[in-house]
Structure formats: C-alpha cells, structure tokens
C-alpha cells in the first residue's frame, strides 16, 4: 500500500474506533481516541474538537508529538491532545491512545481501592492501574491536561502500562493498534463495573499475575481482535467493515 | 436580529433543550425547562403542561415572572411554573432554569450526605448543593411547588448557586443560557451517579474549591458548550442543529 | 357511547397499557394487566397467555370474576388470571389490575425492609405495601397464583391498598382506571429503584402520611394522568393516541 | 420430517437463540450457544468463531463431541468448543449448552456467596450453582477452556445441574432444548442481578427446595417456553418465528 493509502486506511479505522467507543458507552461527549501516523512515527491522527459519537473522516487532523497541528486547518483541536502526544513520545510500542470518562472507572480514582483485573477479558488492562493526580505537581487546575508538561507527567505515571486513572476525571489507555485500544478501553470499563458490583459481597478473587499475562497475550492476538472488531463495528452500525 | 427572530430562535433552542434533557434521561415525564425571554427580561418561555420528550414549538407559552400566562391560550400550563418565575425574579444573571427528577440525585435529598462535585465535568453544579424541604414552612403538601410563595422560598434556598435539591422530589438548576442549563442538569445527574457508585468503596476525594472554580469557568466557555451541544443534539435526533 | 363501543375502547386502552408497561420495563415476558369490563362489572378483559410487549386487540379475552373464560376461544389464558378476578371481586373501586416482576421491587419481598414512598410521584403506591407469602397457607408451590383460592388470599393481603408484593415473585397493583394502573405500576418500580439507591447512604426520609395522601390525590387527577398518558404512549410508539 | 429438514430447523432455531441471548444482554461478543445434532447424538452444531449478535445460518458448523470439526470448512471454530462437547458427552439429557459472561453472575464466582434462586423464574437454574476454578487442576492459564481435558473438568463440576460458574470468567448452562437454554441463561442473569440488589438490604429469603423443584418443572413446560420464545424472538427483531 502507498503511504497515502495507509494514511487513508488509518483514518477510516480511527473513525470507526471513535464510533465504537461512543456506542459502547466508554467515551462520552468529551473523550477522544487517536492513532500514531502509520508511516511517520513522530505524528499522530486525532479528530478536531468534536464528540467521538459524531466524528467523521473530515474531522481528523494530523499533529506532531508536541501537540502542534501539522496544517493550517482553522478548526479547533482538542485542548487535551497533549495526552496523546506525550504517550506516543514516551512509548514507541504504543500505536493508539484513548482518553475516556467511563463512569465506572472514576470511583477507583477517588478512593484507595486499586482497579485490578477480576475477569479474564480484563487481563488486557494490565496488573497495575496507577492513579495520576494533578494536585501535587500542578495544584488547583481546571482538571484538563492541556499542556505538554501535564501530558508528560501523566505519561510518566502510565509508565510501561496499558491504563492509568486521572483523579476526579477519567482514564487513559495505550495499546499496540486501534483494535486493541478498543478492547483495552471497553474491558477496562467492564472490569470496573464488575468490581463495583462485587465489592459489596466481599473481597474479590482477582486474576493472578500469571493469568493476567497469559490471558492478556491471548486476547491481543489476531483471532480475538478480529472477532471483537466484527462485533463492535456491527453494533456501532457499520457491519462488515 | 429582530425581536421576533430572537424570540423564534429562543423557542427553537428551548424545544431542543427539552428533547435533549429527555433523551439524556435527566427529565422524565414530569420535569420542565425554560428560558428567559430574549428581549423582555420580565418574561419567560416554557412549554404548556406537556412532557419534554414530546414538546414542540407550538407548545411554548410566554409567562410573566409571577407565573401569569401572557396570552389567552386555553391550554393548561405547568402547575410548577412558579419555580421558573421565582428564580428569574431573584437572579438577573440566570437566563435558563430546569426542574427535574433525575433518579440519582434524589437520594441526596433524603439523607444527610451532601451532593458535591467529584469529577471535573460536575464542577458546573457548584461547590454547594442546598436541600430545600417544604415541611418547615408549608407542612404537609402535595409536594408540588405550585404557588409563587413556594417558588420564592425555593429560590431563596438556591441563593446564588446553580443547583438545589427538593426533598423527596427532585432538583432545580439555574444557568446563564440554554446550552449551559443542559450541561448543569446532565452533569448534576452524572455526578450523583458517580458518588452513589463511589460511597460503598469509601469516602470520595471531592474536587477542591479551586478546582471547582477553574473547571467550572472553563466548561461554561463557548468551546465546551458548542462541542456538547453538537453531541447532545445529534443524540436527540437533531444532528447539526 | 354504545356498549360495544365502550368495550372496544376499553380493549384499545388495554392494549396500550400492555405496551406501555412493557416499554417502561415494568412488565417483562410474564406479567399482565387487565381492565374491568366497562358495562358488566362482573367481568374483566385480559390478554390470552401472551407477553404484554406483543399483545394486540385480537389477544384480549373476557373472563368472569372466578377466572372462567366467557367464550369458546380455544387459545390458552394466563394461568394467573385468578389474581385479577379475585381483586375485582373484593374491591368494587378497582377498575384495573396489573401483575409484574419489576426487578427493583422484588428485594423488598425478600428482606424485612418495607417498601415505602420516598418521592412525591410514588405517593400513588400508598403508605403501606404489604408482602404476601404463599408458604404459610399453601406450603411449597410452583409460586404461581393459579387458583381462585390463592388469588383470594392475595387479594386479602392487598386489603384496601393499591400495591402488594409477592415473596420471591413480584407485585400486584390495583387502580381506578387504566391510566392510573400505569402510573401506580411505573412509580412503584421507580420508588423501589430510588430506595435501593438510597439505603447504602443511610435511612431515607420517607414521605409523611399527609404528603402521601395529598400528593397521591393530586397525581391521580385528570391533568397528571393525561400528561403521563401522552408521554407513555409516545414512548411506546403510539404518539397521540 | 427428513433428517435434512430436522437439521435445517435446528440451525434456524440455533441462530435465533444466538440473537436472543445477545439481545437480552446475556451473551456478549465472546460467548456462544450450541445444540446437539437432532439425529446424530454424537454431534453438535455451533457457530464458527463469531459473536452471537451477528451469527447467521452460514456460520453454523458441525462438530464431534471431542471438538473435531466434521467438514473441511477452513473458517476458525471457537477455541472453547470443548465446553459444549464435554457437556454433551457427560449428559445425554442435555440438548443445548450456552457459555456466557453476563456481568451480574461473575461476582458470585469471585466471592464465597453462592448464587441461589431468589425468585420463581430463577428456579430453572437449579438449587445449587457450583463454581469451577481452573487453578487447582491447571494452574495459571489464559482462562480459556480450550482443551477437551479442561472441558471435561468443567463438565464434572456441572454434574447433574443446569448451571455452573467459572471463576473470573463467566458461566455455562445446560438444558433440554434451545428454548430452555434461553430461559435458563436469561433467568440466571436476572437472578444474579436480583441478589446483587438485595444483599445490601440483608440476607434474602431464597426459594425453598420444594419451590425450586415445582416452579422449575412448571416453567420448563411447553406453555411458558412457547410464551417466552414468542416474546424473545419479537424483541430480537424476528417476530412470529
């Protein structure tokens, strides 16, 4: 495939990922999902400031890793694009990033109970989900990660993981491709709901470290990702894409 | 724009706000939303007694602040229109008012746990959400705010805030325009759901006063409101309006 | 209106009530709703054994109060039609009866926490919701109220009230007409959800007896019922009926 | 009916069961449902590796009880087909098997609180729902039942029952036909939700053993199954099938 074709394909998949994460109630009006540029690793593709549920191809913009828009497009970008750039900058293995406010995950950013995988599909979120708090480093803010400095601080908390929580705000996910970012984001939400439902019954038996490693590697293989993509695209109204 | 055009535009936006708040499950069959008249500040626009989910342009009526209908329309107005008039009377900064029974907020009117913003989007509800109880002043009633006297008592409890709870009944919201009233009403509900989900895990870390001020000011700016309106109207079946 | 027209109208309204209670998630595949015959008070109208979500005019049958089918229709009636007959027999003021398994109400049949109205709309369920248990009188059964004897036992527990719970099974509601049966059934469910959400926060302040009487009388008036019917029929896909 | 007609009919019903269990939110993208071959009891019919929500007739494959595909179809089968084969092998009375991850059931696999029927419809899940844990026998795995050996271990835990839980994973159900597998799977989920809602209020009064036997036998009779199938197919978009 030519460079232009690869970029076109990435944009199409990115639009689908926007619609999927909106349809599955992971991303509301104020989250976003991006993909690293397929041939220029120092760039990433992300919608203009628009809700993922209504994003189309025309909304996708190209950014440098420091969040600079690579065109003279007059439309407004997301204020929080720095989250994406900072993660791509820090993690060469990451090809896709999401930022969401799935309601079920936020309680784990507000209390001392760690979010840990309790069922097999959630193994993809990783054994440890750190919580980033803007207070110690930045004090009272508007809670938005709208500078490269804040993005880098958050990326540091993410470390080598796949998911992190933002206190009083939401979460970020990082994955090797767009199908995987959907899986990580969706099962992060499902796992949070499961644990919220379980805690009133007692302390849950979480997955072991070995189970997390083995199940996570299996689920991010081609077969489960293809089956899930087939399912999510159909549900979002784009069957067979 | 001419006075008639401004009024027409306000009515169109008001119908959309009705549909949005119904679609987002904030207002059920018995809530309502109003807007102050765009050129006559001593008047407000509100549907006849009809569920917001089915309100159309033809249903909108014009009222004086004391709840008097300004026309000889024979159709029945909402019994609780006094809520709106009393808030507009007391608060010249308020251009839109909603009254809803979002199920998640009512528990905070029934117990001593205060509703406080726990995530950034909820900063718009304000740091303090007072609870109005009809008992001390009015004794056993049918629980409906159907006199100007009760409306004024409720407006007094609201004070300078954006939100207040009604014991065993629901909530009111007050905001500088129709887009903002949707944001305040929707995130009031989302915040209540979040806190209900968090309390069984322990005491949540709420937003600080400084975070509430900064995030609230940012969210009620034009960019977030435009993005949210684009999202809500599309979801309610009126994309691009 | 002629007797035939009155019966036709009752059937049409009964079909709408079936669809409304299914659409509002009060009645699942195994509940039912009936209306007393408009001109023959010793008869009632009820669907053949079919889920309310798919009931049509052709499904409605006519029964005597003892549950006998008043025609040679070969189709199967509900096994639990005796619930309806026994309530009509005991309560001349009741013109409509529903039986449902709304998930939120069943916990109040399984523990010692009484279901009481906690918000104004729920005043219509009445101050006291008794629980009927089939065990003391009938021992181990298939849990179905499939004899007139069991129906009468249940009606006795209902007494002069509007609602009762069946242990490990569901609820019945009794009201003065079809619009009112929808209101009682729907707000019984909403109130149960509200109380389930509130109890983890502490003991709720329930409505007072005076508030229940006044709000209940107001809500079962023509204006609120008309507004609610307009809303429910539109939501169920029959706007303006 | 000829053998081919019987097989065709079984496939059609199996596709409907796939759609029903997806529509009722019992099976997500990664569950499955099968039926024993109607004339060859040592075979079963199951979709290729595809989400039940999008399964069609063309997706159905035929397997031997050891999980071997009985054709040269190049498409990928479910990795967990061994669950189905092992249950059919152990239980000649079982004609249909489902495997699902309904979120409400998983908490009962993570804590010591047993899942027991608390309302009459749930009698079909049986008095005792055992929990299978892969750890003691297989140690750290990817949590997938992807060998005949694991399938047989799980079938042993199921014993003569209708339902079993898999720790940190989901559940299996076994029933005498496709309509019954839908009923068992759906009411297993509904019962789990009910008990989760009830436990914060206190210890629920569960059904007695006698009630479970009597109600379960009644519900798996032709009348309730026909009524439920009529309801589920209509809801899934296939009315009257």
Image (cartoon, coloured by chain):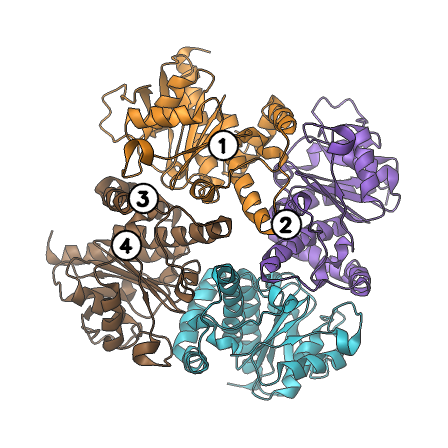
Chain colours: A purple, B orange, C brown, D cyan
The crowd level at tag 1 (other Cα within 10 Å; few <14, some 14-19, many 20+) is: many
Marks 3 and 2, how far apart at CA: 36 Å
- Where does label 1 land, which residue? B129
- Where does label 2 land, which residue? A238
Q: Chain of mark 4?
A: C
Marks 1 and 3, how far apart at CA: 29 Å
Is D201 above or below relative to B115?
Answer: below
Instruction: Name the mark nearer the viewer: 4 or 1.
Output: 1
Marks 4 and 2, how far apart at CA: 41 Å
Marks 4 and 3, how far apart at CA: 12 Å
- Where does label 3 land, which residue? C228
- Residue at the image point whose x is 33% and y is 19% from the top: B65
Instruction: Name the mark nearer the viewer: 1 or 2.
Output: 1
Instruction: Name the mark nearer the viewer: 4 or 2.
Output: 4
Q: Position of residue C146 (x, y in %)?
A: 30, 76
Marks 4 and 1, how far apart at CA: 35 Å
Count of numbered badges drawn on the protein:
4
Judging depth in this view, the residue of B148 and B11 nearest the camera is B148
Secondary structure at numbered mark 1 = loop
Q: Chain of mark 3?
A: C
* Residue A105 seen in the figure: yes
Q: Quadrant of residue B91?
A: top left
Check if mark 4 and mark 2 are on a common chain: no
The crowd level at tag 3 (other Cα within 10 Å; few <14, some 14-19, many 20+) is: many
Residue C181's label in the rendered image is 4
């Amino acid at each position: 495939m030519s460079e232009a074709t690869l970029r076109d394909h990435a944009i199409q998949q990115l639009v689908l990922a926007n619609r999927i994460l909106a349809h599955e109630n992971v991303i509301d009006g104020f989250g976003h999902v991006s993909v690293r540029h397929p041939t220029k690793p120092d760039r990433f593709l992300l919608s203009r400031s628009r809700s993922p549920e209504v994003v189309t191809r025309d909304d996708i913009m190209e950014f440098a890793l420091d969040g600079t828009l690579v065109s003279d497009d007059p439309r407004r970008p997301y204020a929080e694009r720095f989250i994406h750039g900072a993660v791509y900058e820090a993690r060469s293995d990451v090809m896709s990033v999401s930022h969401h406010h799935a309601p079920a995950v936020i309680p784990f950013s507000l209390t001392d109970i760690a979010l840990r995988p309790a069922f097999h599909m959630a193994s993809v979120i990783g054994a440890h989900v750190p919580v980033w708090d803007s207070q110690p480093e930045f004090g009272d803010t508007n809670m938005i990660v709208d500078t490269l400095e804040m993005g880098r601080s958050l990326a540091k908390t993410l470390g080598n993981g796949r998911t992190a929580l933002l206190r009083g705000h939401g979460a970020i996910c990082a994955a090797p491709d767009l199908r995987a970012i959907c899986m990580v984001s969706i099962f992060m939400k499902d796992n949070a709901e499961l644990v919220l439902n379980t805690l009133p019954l007692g302390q849950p038996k979480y997955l072991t470290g070995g189970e997390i490693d083995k199940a996570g590697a299996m689920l991010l293989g081609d077969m489960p990702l293809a089956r899930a993509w087939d399912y999510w695209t159909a549900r979002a109204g784009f069957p067979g894409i």
